Image (cartoon, grey):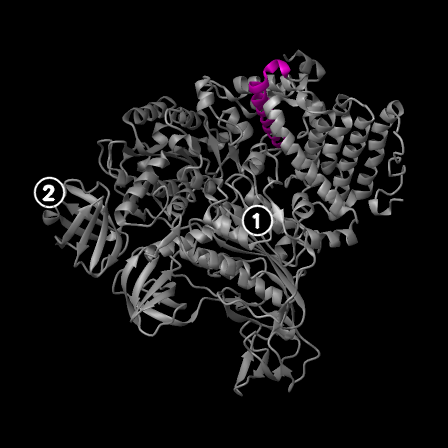
Amino acid sequence: MREKEYRSVSAARGGLLFMRGVPGVALGDRVQVRDQRNRRRDGQVIRTSHEVVLIQVFEGTEGLDPERTWVRFLDRPFEVMLSPALLGRIFNGIGQPRDGRPPVIAALQRNVSGAPVNPAVRAYPREFIQTGISTIDGLNSLVRGQKLPIFSGSGLPHNRLIAQIVRQAKLPAEEQSRFAVVFAALGISHDDARFFRESFETSGVLQNVVMFINLADDPPIERLILPRTALTVAEYLAFDLDHHVLVVLSDMTHYAEALREVATAKGDVPARKGYPGYLYSDLAEIYERAGRIKGRRGSITMVPVVSMPSDDITHPIPDLTGYITEGQIVLSRELHNQGIYPPVTIPPSLSRLMKDGIGKDYTREDHPRVASQLYASYARALDVRNLASIIGAEELTEHDRRSLAFAEAFEQRFVNQGEEEDRAILETLSLAWELLSRLPPEALSRVTEADLARFHRGPSAVDEAP
Amino acid sequence: MGETLDINGPIVTVRLPGVMNGEQVRIGALGLVGEVIGREGDRAIVQVYESTESLRPGEKVEALGHPLTVELGPGLLGQIFDGVQRPLRGLVEQGGDYIARGLSLPPLDRDKAWRFVPSSDLTPGMTLAAGTVLGTVQENPTLSHHILVPPDVEGELIDLVGAGDYTLEQMIARVRDRTGMPRELRLYHRWPVRVPRPYRRRDPAGEPLLTGQRVLDTFFPLLKGGKAAVPGPFGVGKTMVQQQIARWSNVHVVIYVGCGERGNELVDILETFPKLTDPYSGRSLMERTLLVANTSNMPVVAREASIYVGVTLAEYFRDQGYDVVVVADSTSRWAEALREVAGRLGQMPVEEGYPAYLASRLAAFYERAGRVETLAGTTGSITLIGAVSPPGGDFSEPVTSHTKDIIQTFWALSKELADARHYPAVGWADSFSAYVGAAASWWAEHVDPAWAERRAAALGLLTEADELAHIVNLVGPEALSPEQRWVLESASLIREGVLQQSALDPVDSFSSPEKQFVLLDLILEIHDQGRKLITLGLPVQQLLGLPLLGRAQRLKGTYGSDQVPSLRDFVQEIRAAFEPFYRDYGRGEGEPTPRAAPGGSFRRGKRE
């Protein structure tokens, strides 16, 4: 470690320090910055040459006097201490305690940047995780090792949904003791942070949670390193200690905004909406750290929250996220305003890994076809609803009226469920058939004749339906 | 020997006099490999294939004297390589679960001995042209590997070894080249990835690439040697379409380039392909497949290289006289890698941050597709299929719009179809194929002369139904005439019964050309019969309630490609369902009887 401090800051702006005349500094190294009032800040080298070194300061460069700023180069990358004692603790983005307890000291330290998993050793995610939420389990199943984001909007109950998933996520009994949560809060409010803490406490998982918190009023640049710190810990818990780790990142939109802030200060060429061209690769470095590895018992399942600016799913952040993650759960303001919880809107929601995690070996043989049928019938019903809003419900055919009633029941009974209501997958499937039975068998082309014979409740059920 | 000056992400400026543009360099204590992309005085700009974290100014840099090349020889198939052809399975043995930096491994196994059988018609003293087949190695039961004289070598054959087991480094032949120098030839050679391999001449494509997917083969066909793009927003099934093509295409070799996409998708291929059977050879699909993987979290510069690595490997198999399909998922990520490098170099952005040379680079890449007469005089082809991931699903963005100008078949994936779980979500309104005419003669000759007419009829119904759907959305279905309501119903039958095809249904995942045609023909037969009855006065409601319609929708999953005769027999059920109506409403004047006699053949070509 170099003990020498340099005082050659030539400029400080937008969270960046420009230094002159510090030769031979390595890219990505950690630095400590001491300002005129002797306050310490942490930074990282993001560009280096003999003449100029560029440093990104996680606490920002507010109030720094370049003339009286000292920088010490630690000659090593950002690392996080790894030990089982991390469980139950709360840290900031660079791994310093936020819970008033002493720092974790451990022999094992790892670079937070991580390295890409070799695709040849990945194991394909297959094991169904029951969340007890019908719209997820039934129609967009989550599997161990998947990355499945929640696309939300301001004011929508994504935090309540996440908390419910964390409370209810079930592993087979013999694995339940190896369940851990890594919670990465990026720019969330004090209220939300407290809500999560209390929710973890009441459900008794708190001692298995590691929290990394950057609140809305904390320095935004710290958000760039926080997910990396959190995921390095998650990888340790999953692949060194055999835990099944659920990683919650809330909210990735705040991460991307911080990235844009620094990119703009650096003068990077903007691609869309001012976000740098490397936003995709940068997000992928984070999301792709989810998964399973052959020969290791643990897994990393990731549920990031992405709030869509102005509810726009084509905004670069949700858009690029959707290209990287294995599906998405989309929340809708319309359903929320109708009082439906969780307001999961079915047509744009998707789980790409569902096909391999459900069916005979995991849930029930008819599950894939039931899911497909629910989608198709609901999509058709939404068309009818559109039509009805133009020509009036009286003008509809008998068949269309049935379809409309199906949509109503589907939203009220299948989508809608209590925040404490934990539905087993068989319950969800049986509810699905109850609703499908309101439609005549010939309208159900995605299920087989055998399914119909076994599960459709017959013409009487069709006739009873309004 | 030079030194690093400036490190800016994957772009490193070095002082290295005399290095050439495109030359490979090795940098620093870790030995990171990169490629020179610009020169200025004694300085060179290098793009590095690996993360440059911990690199310092002042570290040593060494020029390697050659551009980025690939190794071409036996042992390629069934492998998974990274973007610069490092064998990923080998890297696991060296570096563990994560890809450590600075590892270098030869792409092909040096220890394995291959059974080489020399060509019997070669004798010492003969003059060998580039591309001459020296002999063969049965790489695996599916593919016989032709060992060629490399494209840059020709001359007098000095000697050729006899049949026997040889490792890659052993000499198998010597050729005296033009300068009189003897050149030793081995089972493998190298070729620079950015230089297209030579061939004698282009041979206009003539035969369709059959993917077993009805919406692709029947509606928007692609020819062997052709170029296609699959654009679509996220979640519409791009990868699924690409994987289905990789699974079922009637080609000898499939090269799947995972360019900036998900790691799990490649794992899916690695785990499922060995268990799947190639419908043409009856062997495991993995024996004809090779993967080039640069997943989204792997270094961005190697992503730029990966599609060139993929297409050069394809050219190598093409030169042996094979049909190759290259699936690149996704070309947008490649373009973004280009943009990222351009941005770091401070090049002027033109559209959405992309550099001005985006269009020309894209075009040059796609032009490496084609059906050619090889140097050896055989015919080989490369069919290029690129996925495009337009931001926000906007097809007017630069990568999609430039790609659209280059390719001939455009399979536009639609968000609306995907939201209704209509897969493959290829939209018939935006997709196109410039190969319909060429494909029609093949279908007419091999399947049925009525193919072009039936295809056009089906597309016409779909288009008409889309227009009618607009009216229905404005004023409701009651405003439509009975004929129009029947068109809506028939179009829905085509959508459900023909276009939709589940990749997960073992019966229907692959559909033979015969099955594709018969299915379409049967469903159009229902439409034709119904239309006739409506003109005879039958109320359309009676038709809409027919259980036959539900049965017709399920045909695709009931009869596999090996049960086409039974599928043809369904025409009798159609007849039986309509017969009572004809009794009540007559046959009309001068109307022909339904064209298939009971139990007879249903091939339109044999009608009358």
Q: Is residue B99 visible?
A: no
Say which residue appears at 19% left-offset and 52% top-offset: A18
Q: Is residue A255 depicted above or below B87 in this figure? A: above
Residue B583 tag number: none
The quarter of the picture where residue B369 lies is bottom right
Residue B269 tag number: 1
Q: Residues within 10 Å of mark 1 (few under 14, many from 20)?
A: many
User: In the drawing, does residue B275 fall left or right of residue A141?
Assistant: right
Q: Is residue A157 visible?
A: yes
**Label 2: which secondary element:** loop
Q: Is residue B430 depicted above or below B22 in this figure? A: above
Q: x%, y% of residue A44?
A: 25, 49
Cα–Cα span, label 1 and label 2: 56 Å
Q: Is residue A413 depicted above or below B575 in this figure? A: above
Magenta highlight on residue A391:
yes
Q: Which residues are magenta?
A: A368-395
Please state, as top left, top right, bottom left or bottom right, where the C terminus of chain B lies in the image.
top right
Please state, as top left, top right, bottom left or bottom right, where the N terminus of chain B lies in the image.
bottom left
Residue A38 tag number: 2
Q: Amino acid at mark 2?
A: Asn
Q: x%, y% of residue B588?
A: 88, 29
